[in-house]
Amino acid sequence: MMTSWHLLSLAMLLLLSITPTVTKLENSMNTNCATKFLLNGNAPQVPDILANGNILNQNRYTSICQTFNNVQQFVTLYDKENRIPVFSAYKYTGQQAGIPNRPNRPNRPNKRNRSNRSNRPNRPNRPNISCRPWKIEAELEYIRNVNMVNDKAEYNHNLQAADTDYNGQRIYDRGHMFPVSLAFSQDDKKATCTLTNTVPQTINCNRGEWRIVESDIGKEINRQCINNNNQIEGFVVTGAQPGNNNLNNRVNIPSHLWSAFCCFNSQTAKWIAGAYRISNIQAGCVRQDLTLAQLSKILSPPGTTYDFFPNSHCP
């Protein structure tokens, strides 16, 4: 006959068995979640921040397994002090047919003069994918939830950006690291709409030259990155260089954004790689098309090496 103590113990075990135990915040990028989005499972080497997959300052930085609808979508190394990503890493596998590629932008008051549209460079189309409501990382608010959650004003946002940080902005967008345009399915695209995957990026850059960079990366991978299973597969790391100013006195405004990709082309038996960097200024974005080595030299403090794809054959 079961005693009250036995019944209580059984109830506690049952509760533990149904309570989620998976955490998305890690002190390492050597986890099962992170490695699936990294080339050969190896995290970038980031001087003074990330070494051999281990986060050096664990009070400031954390690895976020970005999860939406219980599916792990990509991984972000996040700076809780600057409230922006160091980088987001993901695997690009092409586009699901019939799915829009860009977030729908809200209408803004006092519309700018659009008479000079004909003089603007050609830009990728902007189909209607809404990022609203924007999401945040639940565990940075000490909410036990395996999924990212919709942002709410009552959250404290001590360790991450808030949607309200961008209220009334006419200069800065929420600029994606992992862009909507390179996500595969509808849920994949919605998963990119978390503020832990964004930085304050000037509107002109985000909707102009940076959008073209994102499109160019997709085109290059589609054209050159066919794996041994005859499928599109490329690994991308996109990050931000912290600047000297903050949005709303809280969220660091990067001086530059950058992106690097690498893949194996089974048809030519060659490794393919490329890199891009763009300034984050409103009056004219400066784009640089680079090699991995050139981008590494720009990002690396003296005597160090920023390695985007360690232990690989990426040129």
Image (cartoon, helix red, strand yellow):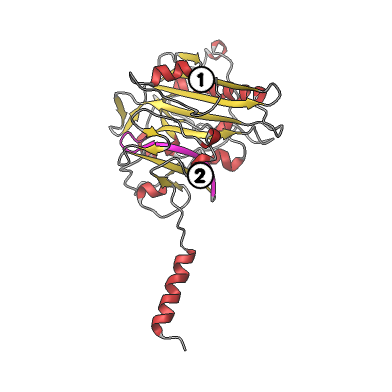
Please tell me in which quadrant of the rendered image residue 268 appears. top right
Q: Residue 103's spot in the image, x, y percent?
A: 54, 33
The residue at the point 58 percent across, 28 percent down is 126
To which residue does mark 2 refer? Answer: 33
Q: Look at the picture and state if 88 lies above or below 68.
A: above
- Kindly state the secondary structure of the residue where label 2 is placed: helix
Q: Residue 190's spot in the image, x, y percent?
A: 54, 40
Q: Look at the picture and state if 122 lies above or below 132.
A: above
Q: Is residue 73 magenta?
A: yes
Q: Nearer the viewer, residue 28 or 194?
A: 28
Sooner in the amino-acid sequence: mark 1 or mark 2: 2
Q: Look at the picture and state if 153 lies above or below 282.
A: below
- Kindly state the secondary structure of the residue where label 1 is placed: strand
The residue at the point 41 percent across, 49 percent down is 138
Q: Please provide the residue range marked out in magenta.
A: 71-84
Residues at marks 1 and 2, CA–CA distance in whole angstroms: 25 Å
Q: Residue 130's spot in the image, x, y percent?
A: 53, 38
Q: Nearer the viewer, residue 228 or 81?
A: 228
Residue 275, numbered circle: 1
Split into 4 quadrants, where in the image is the C terminus?
Answer: top right
